[in-house]
Amino acid sequence: MQNIVIKGGARLTGEVRVSGSKNAALPILASSLLASGRSVYRNVPALGDVRTMHKLLGELGAEVETKTEAKAGGITFVDTSKVENVEAPYDLVKTMRASVVVLGPLTARHGRARVSLPGGCAIGARPIDQHLKGLAAMGAKIELEHGYVTARARRLQGATIVFDMVTVTGTENLMMAAALAKGHTTLENSAREPEVEELARVLNKMGARIQGAGTSQITIEGVDELQPIEHTIIPDRIEAGTLLVAAAITRGNVLVRDCLPEHLDAVIAKLRAAGVEITPEEGGLRARAKGDLKPTDISTQPFPGFPTDMQAQFMVLMTRAKGQSLLTETIFENRFMHVPELQRMGADIQVEGRTVAVRGPTRLTGAEVMATDLRASASLVLAGLIADGTTKIRRVYHGPRLRSAGQEAARAGRRRPTRPGADVKGRTKPAAAATRGTTAAPPVPARMLTLALPRGRILEEALLLFREAGIDLSAADKTRAGRRLIIPVEAAGIRVLIVRDTDVPAYVEGGAADLGIAGRDVLDEQGRDLYEPLDLGIGRCRMVVAEPEGRPVDEAAPFHLRYATKFPEITRRHLQSRGVVADVIKLYGSIEIAPLVGLADRIVDLVSSGETLRQHHLREVETILDVSARICVGRAAAKLHGDRIDSLIKRLRAVVR
Ligand code: EPZ
């Protein structure tokens, strides 16, 4: 983890070179798995995600070497002749969702792949159902188990696949799978991103027969074998767009070299609409901001529309425009994590569902802010460039790109001594700031972790367990908290939310709480995309099937049985696994009486002592689930507060029985 410290106020002038495209490099590196032998890729960006892909290829058995050359940028050599392992482990996939793009190549080339489900991230749930649907349509047998997806197919078969929504890595995964499938594949409603077109170029160079990449209909004639190749990766259009915004927002004049203007049409159009002068020049694009910036509305769309990966950066630019701009995010459901940080710097931004209203011009002031995802962090660097004073961006784990972009521009500025460049430094320790004479921002207390606890028995048992682990949350005890539902416990650095047990997962998945405690019944019933790192062994009970004493139910009866329960999903899955055909009636309470008043034949409910069943003359038929409460953690929180959450869990694990 790194911090970036920026002293704002400089005007950016000079020129800067754009590096290779991250979102092209990742699937291209994965495509090396489709052939046996040594591939060579040039202009590979030096990034954390790329390093993770190198590690993943190494994990699968490939030999990966890298080197850097002045002109060619990063070079990666991948030799796949010894690839045997087909499992992409959780530890790697959790750090980089795009690891999922090894699923198609491994299944196509090795007939089997086992990949940890990527799960959600700071910007959204990001399911991969379209990837799996496509592979299944090509004849792969798909299984989801223990957080992993396994795909098996002796040989994939060509198929026609229509995507329910435009998906970039979905298109890329299935294009790679189809390249080695038997027969003809058509991908309808495909992504048209330049990175998809670039991947098709690479695959065709390897011997594939792909047409229509860059349009919404891609056709692939499968071949029996592909060859390793050498390839130079296209420049990163999002980095180029970010640098154009950096020039405009600092009222600068910068030539962005080695970018491809045709990949940036939508971004250039919006920058021009905002009053930024964008001029194609030999080897690049020049950005100059002259007059006042004009408010400009955007709505993110799949390519060739305005890219979602430029939304955060454009938002900062609009804080300088005279008037109100409306920015709508249509691709990801949670891509405004940068807004509260920009508001802390003084931006006037209102969020209304998936649209934000940005009013300007506002003067931003330097502050300590938190990085969430790569693009949100880029927007905080841009804000730091124009803010009064010093901005410190914490928890930057997106690798050097962010810092290098700022320093590139700074270095470019200084090349022309008359004009100062930006003051951007990467720091690990605040002390560093002091030694170099720039004033480090006063330390801001780390944000408290938010813990959602269900009121009732689990709350009491959880407080006891925390106390045993040396964490005193007794302020949240009913007697002390009274009717309060939000209880900050400064000493523990934890803010407790007291919520209904069935709502805990929603608070955690929605990011309102970083972690929570919920019963296995609730978690299994809702099936939300959360990490469940620890079973606390509290709130123990059992989920059982019960029926009226003396009225045994014949499961083979020629009519639909009726099961009443609070847990319809778990009940349906259980009955399915038992081959029992039944109607499941969802109730919210007093389940016990349902069979007694003829509403149902059986119930599925939680029991601890079994006393309630006995009082209602019901007898247990079977236990379908042993229930206890678990810690559940949000995907974004795991990334943002990983260390603190891990240490908390470690302390709890030590006292769990
Ligand atoms: C790619 O992500 C990029 N990542 C993202 O860039 C980019 O934001 C995104 O495309 C959109 O342009 C890489 O190329 C590595 P999607 P991807 O599948 O492929 C839904 C960055 O900052 N969906 O096109 O994962 C999904 O939830 C990153 O560089 C399903 O519902 O995005 C989203 O709402 C962030 N089911 C929408 O479609 C699926 O099976 C588009 O997602 C697949 C996607």
Image (cartoon, rainbow, N blue to C red):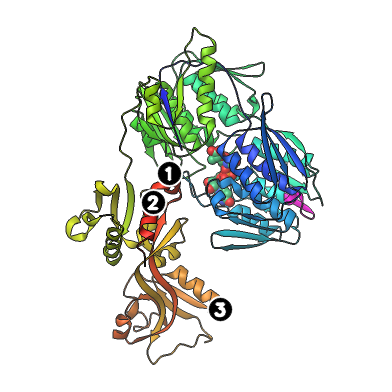
**Is residue 168 something that shows in the picture?**
no
Height in image: 516 above or below 353? below
Quadrant location, ligand no. 1? top right
Q: Nearer the viewer, mark 3 or mark 1?
A: 1
- Taking 330 as reference, is 632 left or right? left
In this rendering, the answer to whether 637 lies above or below 258 is below
> Tag 2: Cα neighbours inside 10 Å, few (<14), some, or many (≥20)?
few
The secondary structure type at the circle numbered 2 is helix
Labelled pair 3, 2 in contact (Cβ < 8 Å)? no
Residue at coordinates 58% horizontally, 26% vertically from top-left?
A: 240
Provide the residue span drawn in magenta. Answer: 178-187
Dot 3 or dot 2, earlier in sequence: 3
Image side of residue 205 versus residue 235, left or right: right
Q: Nearer the viewer, residue 168 or 80?
A: 80
Residue 640, numbered circle: 1
Which badge, 2 or 1, is on the more N-terminal residue? 1
- Crowd band around label 3 with a 10 angstrom C-alpha radius: few (<14), some (14–19), many (20+): few
Q: Earlier in the sequence, mark 3 or mark 1?
A: 3
| Label 1, residues with CA under 10 Å away: few <14, some 14-19, many ≥20 | many
Measured from the top left, where is residue 173 in percent x and y?
66, 48
The amino acid marked with disc number 3 is Gly
Q: Position of residue 337 (x, y in %)?
A: 42, 39
**Residue assigned mark 2:** 647
Mark 2 vs ligand 1: CB below 8 Å: no
Q: Which mark is residue 241?
A: none
Residue 502, placed above or below residue 409: below
Amino acid under label 1? Leu
Is the CB of mark 1 within 8 Å of ligand 1?
A: no
Q: Amino acid at mark 2?
A: Ser
Would you say residue 179 sits in the magenta stretch?
Answer: yes
- The residue that mark 3 highlights is 579
